[in-house]
Every structure is written in structure tokens, then in C-alpha cells.
Amino acid sequence: MEHLNKKFFYDLSFEELETFFIKSDLPKYRAKQIWLSVYKQGISDFNSITNLPLSLRQLLSETFTLERLEVEKISTSKDKTKKILVKCLDGNTFEAVIIPEKDYFTVCVSSQIGCNMGCKFCCTGSQKMIRNISTGEIVMQFLLAKDLIQDWKKNVKKLKNIVFMGMGEPLLNLDNVTKAIKILTSPDGLAISRHHITISTCGIVPNIKKCAKDLKVNLALSLHAVNDVSRSSLMPINKKYPLNDVLKACREYSLLTKTKITFEYILIDGVNDSEQDAKKLVSIISGINAKINLIPFNAWDGCDFATSKENKILKFSNVLKQKGYEILIRRSKGGDVDAACGQLKMRNL
């Protein structure tokens, strides 16, 4: 493949692009021209950046690949959610999801190909871990989503939010995730507000603290149980980072970043959905500035769990509401094309 001898442009930070120009004895200001063309206008061919000299366009084309990654397949749900299967330059594939809201879109991005967390309720977690997704591959998911909804044009419904809730554990790929977020939030590029970016984690305590210092985006904790015994049975990572340590890190994150923690809680019939569980949940998160997303379990082949009954979901929700918490019962979109929470999976070509 011709790409193998070229660098993937989207892996570069702006500072690295400037460094390339300095080392090449070229005007540094050209870096900003290219950055604006790629990330403000969506240009994916150096020859289309016509304010650059032809010789520079040729050098860039020989050094970097600016082409989009291939979208192998698009699956569209009856609710208009789109799941895209992205093929990497090395032949591996992963999935991302574009979720329509009333006035905007959210893109759910993946951070790893596969996952080694092994959460019992998650289809992705039932598969082997292949590798981390690169900085550029993370950024590419956002660009591909913008392409599909034609967000490079004026007067269209915008791609507004980014949630790291796809395949993998983002905080185990923190270097690439951090670099990608800095590219996505660059004021000279895509200029996404950090307030519109959410990282979801199983609870990698040391890296929660790093995120508080370096990123200051929204944090969502995959909680799903109210004591260590239950959580460890559902989420093996809890044995390494027990509930008290995880909740302490969340409390510190909220205080340091002045943000509200989102606790994600998948409701599984007969496992974690009793009123007693709801009361215990209130107890363990007391004092944390938080909101709670209740997520009815999304079934997938090979998993024996069942979705909580509607009356139990409502009773659980009411216990939390009575204590003053902001509650969202998140009816996951895209379930008919396996694009809902916990359903993403890799397909090796």
C-alpha cells in the first residue's frame, strides 16, 4: 500500500506540524494554512489547498496521507442512528456511532479495537483486545461523521457533542485520547468545546486524576453496582480499583474541574435493579456533584442478562429523584442495528 511509507496526517498535533516546517526550512506560517484547510474546511487532498505553492503540495503529498479512512459499512437504524464500520490502514476495523438529536448530532467514538475490561454486560468486553486506536483514528471518527451529515456546509444541523463511549476503555489509551482532544478542541480547527466532550471510564483511578489535570472534559463513570461484591462480578476491573477508591477519584475530579460527574448505571433484571440498590446508590454517591443516567440493559447474542422491567426502572428512578438527583432514563438509540450502549463489536477483515 502506498500509505505505508507515509505518515497519517491526523496523528499530528499543530505543534508537530509546525516542527515539520521548521525542520524542512519552510515558512512556519504555512502550518496554520494547512490546519485551517483540513479542520475548518474539511479538505482531504493537499492538491486542493490552492493557497499553497505546488512544490509544497507535492512535498506534503509525498510525506503524509490526508485521505479519509474507508467507511466499510453504514448501518442506519429506524431512529436514524448511523453505525459506521471504519477500516484502518492496517486492515483492522472498529465501529463508531452518529446519534441524531432534535437540533444536533452526537458522535460516539471508540478508543480501542476490542477491549480487555471484560464487563459481563458488554458485547465489546467479550472480545479480545487488538490494539489502541491512534490519535488520528480518533480524530477521523469525528471527521467521517461530519462528512456523513454534511456538517462542512452552512445552515445544517451540527455535530455538537463527542462521547468516548464506543469500543474500549479510553483511560487505558490516555495519551492518544488526550492528544486527539487537543486537536478536536483547537480554536484554529474544529473548535469543539470541552464542555461538549465526555469521557466514559470503568474507573481507572490514576488516569481519572490525570484527566482532571490535563483535559477537564466531562467525566462519566460506568458504575452499574452499589457494592464491591456485585460490581466485581460485573466488572473485573473493580478488583484492582475498588468502589471507594473510584468514587473518591470522582469526587476529586468534580471539585478540581468544577464539573458534574455522570454516573452511568445499566439496569439488569434481578441483578442490580431493586429499590434497595437505588437507596444504596444514593448513599455511596452522597456529596458528589452528580447526575445519573439509568440505562436499560441492551441485549446481545451470547449474554444471559435481561432488561429490567419497566415498573422496576421507574421505581428505581423515583428513589433517586426523591433525593434531588437529576435523572435521565437513557433509551439507547440504534438497538436494531447493534449500535446501542454495550453492543459495539469489532469485525476483523
Image (cartoon, helix red, strand yellow):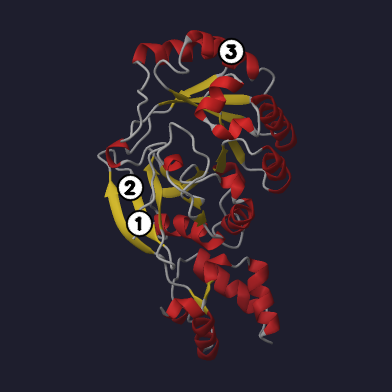
The x, y position of residue 41, in whole percent, is 47, 66
| Residue 55 percent across, percent down from the top left | 53, 91
Question: Label 1, on which residue?
Answer: 148
Q: Provide residue 349's location: percent of width, then percent of height.
A: 33, 60
Q: Is residue 21 left or right of residue 314?
A: right
Q: What residue type is labelled 2?
A: Lys
Residue 51 seen in the figure = no
Please report whichever mark, 3 or 2, sits nearer to the chain's N-terminal start.
Answer: 2
- Looking at the rendered structure, which numbered label has been put on residue 280? 3
Quarter occupied by residue 203:
top right
Q: Given contact means CB atoms under 8 Å apart, are the residues at marks 3 and 2 in contact?
A: no
Left-right relation of 42 to 36: left
Q: Are marks 2 and 1 in contact (CB under 8 Å)?
A: yes
Q: How far apart are marks 3 and 1 (CA)?
A: 43 Å
Residue at 48%, 81% in the rendered image: 50
What distance separates the C-alpha of mark 2 from that of mark 1?
Answer: 9 Å
Residue 194, placed above or below residue 18: above
On residue 82, the disc is 2
* Badge nearest the viewer, 3 or 2: 3
Of the numbered discs 2 and 1, the one sitting upstream in the chain is 2
Q: In which quarter of the image is residue 204?
A: top right
Residue at image x 45%, y 56%?
A: 141
Q: What element carries label 2?
A: strand
Verify CB contact (< 8 Å) between mark 3 and mark 1.
no
Closer to viewer: mark 3 or mark 1:
3
- State the residue lying farthest toward the bottom: 55
Helix, strand or loop for disc 3 = helix
Instruction: Give percent across and percent down for residue 155.
Output: 39, 53
Q: Earlier in the sequence, mark 3 or mark 1?
A: 1
- Quick one: 114 or 328, which is closer to the camera? 114
